[in-house]
Image (cartoon, helix red, strand yellow):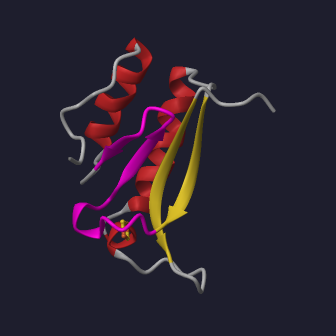
Amino acid sequence: MKKPKHHIFVCASFRMSGTPQGVCNKKGAGSLLQYLENELSDRGMDEVSVSMTGCLKLCDKGPVMVIYPQNLWYGEVTESKIDEVLDALEEGKPLDKYQIT
Ligand code: FES
């Protein structure tokens, strides 16, 4: 496997028990993950990896998504925000609009 150019982490609210229980999960992180995977595939963005994470400790901003190596943190993520973030990633410029500050 090639090293990814970008790695997107989406909080899936997993707890130590392995059960997803937190805010991001309740706000639909699971379906957002599926949407993100589908969008990346449709756009041919095979240089981007996606991983689910445990709680990223910003629950009140959930669902939370992080992109490395740029260290971009996005909160209250929706499908339309994912579209804008991916558009910006394709253009090579980070989208500041929805970043958690
Ligand atoms: S549950 Fe997602 S940041 Fe805490």
Give yes or no for residue 66 being in the magenta stretch.
yes
Quadrant of the rendered image containing residue 71: top left
Q: Quarter of the image holding residue 89?
A: top left
Residue 91 rendering spot, x and y as whole percentages: 38, 13
- Look at the picture and state if 25 lies above or below 101: below
Q: Identify the residue at image location x=27%, y=28%.
A: 95
Residue in the image at 60% along x and 26% along y: 5
Q: Is residue 58 magenta?
A: yes
Task: Give how far across and how far down residue 42 sits, in percent.
Answer: 53, 26
In percent of width and height, residue 41 lies at 57, 30
Quadrant of image for the N terminus: top right
* Residue at the limit of the structure toward the right, as seen here: 1
The residue at the point 51 percent across, 22 percent down is 43
Q: Is residue 18 above or below residue 58?
A: below
Image side of residue 43 versus residue 72, left or right: right
Pick the front one: 4 or 37: 4
Looking at the image, in which quadrant does ligand 1 appear? bottom left
- Specify start and end residues of the magenta stretch as a single range: 55-74
Looking at the image, residue 7 sits to the left or right of residue 36; the answer is right
Q: Quadrant of residue 70?
A: top left
Residue under the point 23% across and 31% down = 96
Residue 43, placed above or below residue 53: above
Q: Nearer the viewer, residue 98 or 78?
A: 98
Furthest toward the top, the residue is 91
- Whole-percent x and y of residue 86? 39, 28
- Please tell me whether residue 15 is drawn above or below residue 77 in the rendered image: below
Please give the count of numbered marks on the rendered protein: 0
